[in-house]
Image (cartoon, helix red, strand yellow):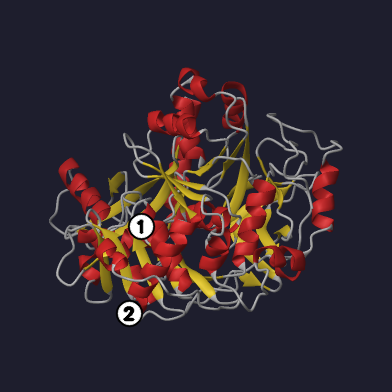
């Protein structure tokens, strides 16, 4: 086991491939012990598992041990202990159980980052039920589609988000935080406070699901997948080896728990390790981000390149107050630009490392803060111990350095890989012994892997993976739209933005007011992050002779335009 107190990665930008420090990473890979990794998280055995116990109860013996620091702008910081969370989660679990929730049932949370969200997650897990995240920026259509597909029994929300859940009130019980519930809604705190809190954790196995996630697709609705309890072992391995989360760290992952990176690594993994996590309840602003880092003494920070580029845009003066405070910064969701790495080293005095993962996998490819190895600018790094990441060709053959191919996991030699397929959907991503990520990469001579681009139509806007099909489906519900195609347009700030090409119904004339109407419609129906920031009205869309939409033609046109603009 490595010494978690050793400071092996001081702020630096790059280590050459000949560095002797590569040996530590190789030792960690060669010496990886999957049985020891499981025993550290599930000491009672893989057949006696409960996520609430793992992430809360077993750390509650110390009444002063803080699980959550809750920050809201212009309010005092609240610290909530594991013991408090365990007692309140037991009460809320009784509320859920009285509404018929049993092991394996789904409970959804449509809440901002506030203590009630964490209580909802823990109480769900306490019953052996499956937590379903709903991003607070989702609109009614996105919520209804996911609740219907999952067969959700209970949805927990608040007054602000309750109107977006009106379309599912007939499908599930709704519990509302605050006095603004409608009709038969239950009041969150009134129900919780009326229970004795005697619900014991339900015994599960490591193969039982504890999360249901929806990942965006290119040719159909978002695809559901069940995350088994054994995935917690992989989540913790990432926090330990890549994020280098240590005792004494003040940790903040700015990602929203409505998505995989926030739910896996701002909630599940740090709490499983017994560490304090941070919830910031409020919109992202540069000023408040720096203020929170300084106010809470944050030493270990995680987020997306979009957020980090906004910090850079504010200039070095804004960063001066926290320069030297951050020991480690981790970036995920989209490739990390080399200029971000250099800026963080110069103006924040810290190392920022790029990490790669998917909803289906968790994080699997990283420049590790906790394991020394060469760090090549522009590279996503090396496989986390417990995973074997390879580059494969069209026939599934493994490729050597410098040969572009698809990033894949060898599931025969990846004992921490937990994804086995989509729930009630075909899973074409498995070819033989390989899971194909759909992302194009190539291996470097030192064994690290560099990201080249995506191999499908998924849009990466500010780290959000957006499936064009969902946006197109919302577009054609607008009374003026006959057909639509959606692509990701290159954007220097957000990586990509959503751009829609729209064919109007006969007799309707395009203008700026109509474009704004369509944008507002999609934003309200789907979500605030997935609406088309640009709309082009066209007479027809490129299709194959069989009528299949050819988004790649539109995407290539936009890439060519961007290249032409950069050259002038």
Relative vertical location of residue 290 with respect to residue 477 in this rendering, above or below: above
What secondary structure is found at the residue carrying circle 1? helix
Question: Residue sitting at 16 percent across and 43 percent down?
Answer: 513
Q: Is residue 218 visible?
A: no
Furthest residue in direction left, as rendered? 507
Where residue 472 sits: x, y (%)? 33, 60
Question: Residue sitting at 41 percent across and 30 percent down?
Answer: 286
Q: CA distance from mark 2 to mark 1?
A: 19 Å
Q: Is residue 226 visible?
A: yes
Where residue 454 sits: x, y (%)? 55, 52
Where residue 556 sits: x, y (%)? 48, 47
Towards the viewer: 302 or 294: 294
Where does label 2 land, which residue?
98
Question: Residue sitting at 72 percent across and 45 percent down?
Answer: 4
What secondary structure is found at the residue carrying circle 2? helix
Question: Residue sitting at 54 percent across and 61 percent down?
Answer: 55
Where does label 1 land, which residue?
116
Relative vertical location of residue 332 with respect to residue 377 in this rendering, above or below: below
Towards the viewer: 536 or 86: 86
Q: Quadrant of residue 40?
A: bottom right
Sequence order check, earlier mark of 2 and 1? 2
Mark 2 in CB contact with mark 1 (< 8 angstroms): no
């Amino acid at each position: 086991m490595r010494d978690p107190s050793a400071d092996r990665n001081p702020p630096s930008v790059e280590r050459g491939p000949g560095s002797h420090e590569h040996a530590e990473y190789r030792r960690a890979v060669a010496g990886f012990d999957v049985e020891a990794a499981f025993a550290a998280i599930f000491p009672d055995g893989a057949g006696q598992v409960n996520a609430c116990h793992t992430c809360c109860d077993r750390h509650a013996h110390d009444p002063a041990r803080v699980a959550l620091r809750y920050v809201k702008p212009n309010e005092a910081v609240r610290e909530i202990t594991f013991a408090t969370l365990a007692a309140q989660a037991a009460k809320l679990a009784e509320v859920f159980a009285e509404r018929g929730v049993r092991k394996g049932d789904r409970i959804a949370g449509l809440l901002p980052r506030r203590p009630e969200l964490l209580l909802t997650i823990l109480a769900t897990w306490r019953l052996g039920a499956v937590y379903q995240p709903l991003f607070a920026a989702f609109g009614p259509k996105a919520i209804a589609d996911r609740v219907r597909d999952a067969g959700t029994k209970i949805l927990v929300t608040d007054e602000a988000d309750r109107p977006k859940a009106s379309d599912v009130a007939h499908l599930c019980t709704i519990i509302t935080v605050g006095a603004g519930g409608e009709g038969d809604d239950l009041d969150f705190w009134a129900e919780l406070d009326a229970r004795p809190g005697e619900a014991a954790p339900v015994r599960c196995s490591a193969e039982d699901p504890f999360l249901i996630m929806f990942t965006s697709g290119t040719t159909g609705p978002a695809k559901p997948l069940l995350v088994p309890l054994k995935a917690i072992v992989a989540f913790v391995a990432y926090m330990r080896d890549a994020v280098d989360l240590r005792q004494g760290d003040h940790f903040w992952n700015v990602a929203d728990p409505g998505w995989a990176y926030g739910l896996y690594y701002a909630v599940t993994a740090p709490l499983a390790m017994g560490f304090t996590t941070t919830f910031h309840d409020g919109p992202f602003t540069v000023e408040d981000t720096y203020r929170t880092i300084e106010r809470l003494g944050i030493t270990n920070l995680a987020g997306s390149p979009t957020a980090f580029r906004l910090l850079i845009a504010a200039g070095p003066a804004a960063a001066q107050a926290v320069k030297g405070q951050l020991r480690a910064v981790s970036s995920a969701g989209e490739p990390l630009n080399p200029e971000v790495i250099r800026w963080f080293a110069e103006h924040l005095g810290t190392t920022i490392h790029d990490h790669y993962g998917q909803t289906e996998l968790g994080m699997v490819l990283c420049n590790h803060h906790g394991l020394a190895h060469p760090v090549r600018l522009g590279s996503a790094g090396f496989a986390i111990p417990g995973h074997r990441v390879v580059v494969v060709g069209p026939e599934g053959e493994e490729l050597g350095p410098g040969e572009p191919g698809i990033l894949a996991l060898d599931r025969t030699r990846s004992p921490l890989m937990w994804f086995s397929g989509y729930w009630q959907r075909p899973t074409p991503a498995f070819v033989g012994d390989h899971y194909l990520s759909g992302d194009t990469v190539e291996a470097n001579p030192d064994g690290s892997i560099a990201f080249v681009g995506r191999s499908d139509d998924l849009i990466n806007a500010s780290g959000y993976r957006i499936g064009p099909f969902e946006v197109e489906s919302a577009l054609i519900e607008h009374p003026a739209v006959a057909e639509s195609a959606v692509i990701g347009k290159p954007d220097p700030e957000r990586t990509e933005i959503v751009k829609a090409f729209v064919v109007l119904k006969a007799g309707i004339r395009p203008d700026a007011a109509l474009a704004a109407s369509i944008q507002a419609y999609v934003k309200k129906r789907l979500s605030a992050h997935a609406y088309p920031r640009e709309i082009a009205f066209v007479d027809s869309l490129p299709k194959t002779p069989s009528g299949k939409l050819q988004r790649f033609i539109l995407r290539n046109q936009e890439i060519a335009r961007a290249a032409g603009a950069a050259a002038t």
